[in-house]
Image (cartoon, helix red, strand yellow):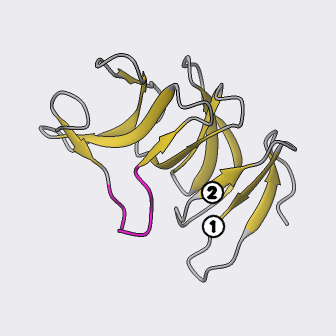
Amino acid sequence: MPAADGTSFALVDRATPALDVSADGRALAWSACENASGACALYVRPIDRFDATRLAGTDGATAPFFSPDGRWIAFFADGKLKKIATSGGAPSVLADAPFAGGGAWGRNGRIVFSGLPAGGLSLVSDQGGAVT
Protein backbone atom coordinates (compact mmCIF):
# COMPACT_ATOMS: atom_id res chain seq x y z
CA MET A 1 0.00 0.00 0.00
CA PRO A 2 1.48 3.42 -0.89
CA ALA A 3 1.95 6.10 1.77
CA ALA A 4 -0.44 8.36 -0.22
CA ASP A 5 -1.29 8.49 -3.91
CA GLY A 6 1.91 9.01 -5.89
CA THR A 7 4.22 8.76 -2.85
CA SER A 8 6.42 6.31 -0.97
CA PHE A 9 7.39 6.28 2.71
CA ALA A 10 10.49 8.34 3.43
CA LEU A 11 13.14 6.40 5.32
CA VAL A 12 16.27 8.20 6.41
CA ASP A 13 17.59 4.93 7.75
CA ARG A 14 16.02 1.86 9.32
CA ALA A 15 16.42 3.26 12.85
CA THR A 16 14.39 6.40 12.13
CA PRO A 17 10.60 5.96 12.21
CA ALA A 18 8.63 7.20 9.20
CA LEU A 19 5.18 6.84 10.83
CA ASP A 20 3.51 7.69 14.14
CA VAL A 21 0.06 7.15 15.63
CA SER A 22 -1.51 9.72 17.97
CA ALA A 23 -1.88 8.68 21.63
CA ASP A 24 -5.67 8.35 21.27
CA GLY A 25 -5.23 6.20 18.15
CA ARG A 26 -7.36 8.54 16.02
CA ALA A 27 -4.71 9.94 13.65
CA LEU A 28 -1.66 8.90 11.66
CA ALA A 29 1.29 11.06 10.61
CA TRP A 30 4.08 10.01 8.29
CA SER A 31 6.87 11.24 6.10
CA ALA A 32 6.53 10.43 2.41
CA CYS A 33 8.24 11.44 -0.81
CA GLU A 34 6.55 12.11 -4.12
CA ASN A 35 7.50 9.43 -6.63
CA ALA A 36 7.78 11.89 -9.53
CA SER A 37 9.78 14.71 -7.91
CA GLY A 38 11.30 13.05 -4.84
CA ALA A 39 10.03 15.95 -2.67
CA CYS A 40 9.33 14.75 0.89
CA ALA A 41 6.83 16.15 3.40
CA LEU A 42 4.53 15.18 6.26
CA TYR A 43 1.11 13.68 5.64
CA VAL A 44 -1.70 13.24 8.16
CA ARG A 45 -5.03 11.47 8.16
CA PRO A 46 -7.68 10.43 10.63
CA ILE A 47 -7.67 6.67 11.19
CA ASP A 48 -11.25 6.36 9.91
CA ARG A 49 -10.48 7.91 6.48
CA PHE A 50 -8.34 6.90 3.54
CA ASP A 51 -7.46 10.32 2.10
CA ALA A 52 -4.32 11.97 3.46
CA THR A 53 -3.45 15.65 3.75
CA ARG A 54 0.02 16.94 2.92
CA LEU A 55 1.08 19.54 5.49
CA ALA A 56 2.45 22.64 3.76
CA GLY A 57 5.76 23.91 5.15
CA THR A 58 7.07 20.44 6.00
CA ASP A 59 9.40 19.98 3.03
CA GLY A 60 12.12 17.45 3.80
CA ALA A 61 10.38 16.25 6.98
CA THR A 62 11.32 12.95 8.60
CA ALA A 63 10.68 11.06 11.85
CA PRO A 64 7.33 12.60 12.93
CA PHE A 65 5.86 12.18 16.41
CA PHE A 66 2.67 13.51 18.00
CA SER A 67 2.14 15.71 21.04
CA PRO A 68 0.29 13.89 23.85
CA ASP A 69 -3.00 15.64 22.97
CA GLY A 70 -2.59 14.85 19.26
CA ARG A 71 -2.90 18.51 18.21
CA TRP A 72 0.76 18.91 17.16
CA ILE A 73 3.36 16.92 15.29
CA ALA A 74 7.10 17.31 15.86
CA PHE A 75 9.47 16.40 13.03
CA PHE A 76 13.01 16.87 11.74
CA ALA A 77 13.83 18.98 8.66
CA ASP A 78 16.60 21.32 7.56
CA GLY A 79 18.83 20.32 10.48
CA LYS A 80 16.17 21.38 13.00
CA LEU A 81 13.52 19.87 15.26
CA LYS A 82 10.23 21.56 14.35
CA LYS A 83 6.54 21.34 15.22
CA ILE A 84 3.36 22.01 13.27
CA ALA A 85 -0.33 21.84 14.14
CA THR A 86 -2.06 18.74 12.79
CA SER A 87 -4.55 21.12 11.15
CA GLY A 88 -1.71 22.85 9.29
CA GLY A 89 -0.18 26.31 9.49
CA ALA A 90 3.39 27.47 9.72
CA PRO A 91 5.90 25.19 11.44
CA SER A 92 7.96 26.46 14.39
CA VAL A 93 11.61 25.65 15.03
CA LEU A 94 12.21 24.12 18.46
CA ALA A 95 15.92 23.24 18.37
CA ASP A 96 18.94 22.53 16.23
CA ALA A 97 19.03 18.86 15.27
CA PRO A 98 21.42 17.98 12.45
CA PHE A 99 20.52 14.28 12.80
CA ALA A 100 16.93 12.96 12.68
CA GLY A 101 17.07 10.25 15.31
CA GLY A 102 13.48 10.43 16.56
CA GLY A 103 11.83 11.81 19.66
CA ALA A 104 9.10 11.57 22.26
CA TRP A 105 6.80 14.35 23.49
CA GLY A 106 5.97 14.16 27.20
CA ARG A 107 2.80 15.35 28.91
CA ASN A 108 4.94 17.82 30.86
CA GLY A 109 5.59 19.85 27.69
CA ARG A 110 9.11 18.56 27.23
CA ILE A 111 10.47 16.78 24.19
CA VAL A 112 13.29 14.22 24.38
CA PHE A 113 14.99 13.75 21.04
CA SER A 114 18.05 12.35 19.35
CA GLY A 115 19.39 15.07 17.11
CA LEU A 116 23.15 14.71 17.07
CA PRO A 117 25.16 12.36 14.82
CA ALA A 118 27.35 11.38 17.80
CA GLY A 119 24.28 10.08 19.64
CA GLY A 120 22.84 10.88 23.02
CA LEU A 121 19.54 12.44 23.99
CA SER A 122 18.57 16.09 24.25
CA LEU A 123 15.69 17.80 26.03
CA VAL A 124 13.77 20.91 24.93
CA SER A 125 10.49 22.59 25.81
CA ASP A 126 7.66 22.16 23.31
CA GLN A 127 7.84 25.98 23.03
CA GLY A 128 11.52 25.89 22.03
CA GLY A 129 14.37 27.47 23.98
CA ALA A 130 17.47 26.10 25.66
CA VAL A 131 18.42 22.51 24.86
CA THR A 132 19.91 20.35 27.61
Quadrant position of residue 46: top left
What span is in magenta?
A: 11-18
Left or right: where does residue 108 sit relative to residue 23?
Answer: right
Q: Residue at x 12, y 37 (%)?
A: 36
Q: Give the residue type at disc 2.
A: Gly
Give the numbered dot on residue 11.
Answer: none
Q: Position of residue 71 (x, y in %)?
A: 66, 25
Q: Residue at x 40, y 51 (%)?
A: 18
Q: Quadrant of residue 65?
A: top right
Q: What amino acid is at disc 1?
A: Ser
- Whole-Å distance between the Cαs marked 2 and 1? 6 Å
Whole-percent x, y for residue 112 in the image: 73, 59
Q: Which residue is mark 1?
A: 114
Count the numbered circles shown: 2
Compared with 6, 48 (above or below) is: above
Residue 116 position within the rendered picture, expressed as x and y whole percent measured from the top left: 62, 73
Q: Quadrant of the N terminus?
A: top left
Residue drawn at (45%, 33%), measured in percent from left and top? 28
Label 2 sits on residue = 103
Q: Judge whether 123 appears above or below 57 on screen.
A: below
Q: Residues at badges 2 and 1 in contact (C-beta under 8 Å)?
A: yes
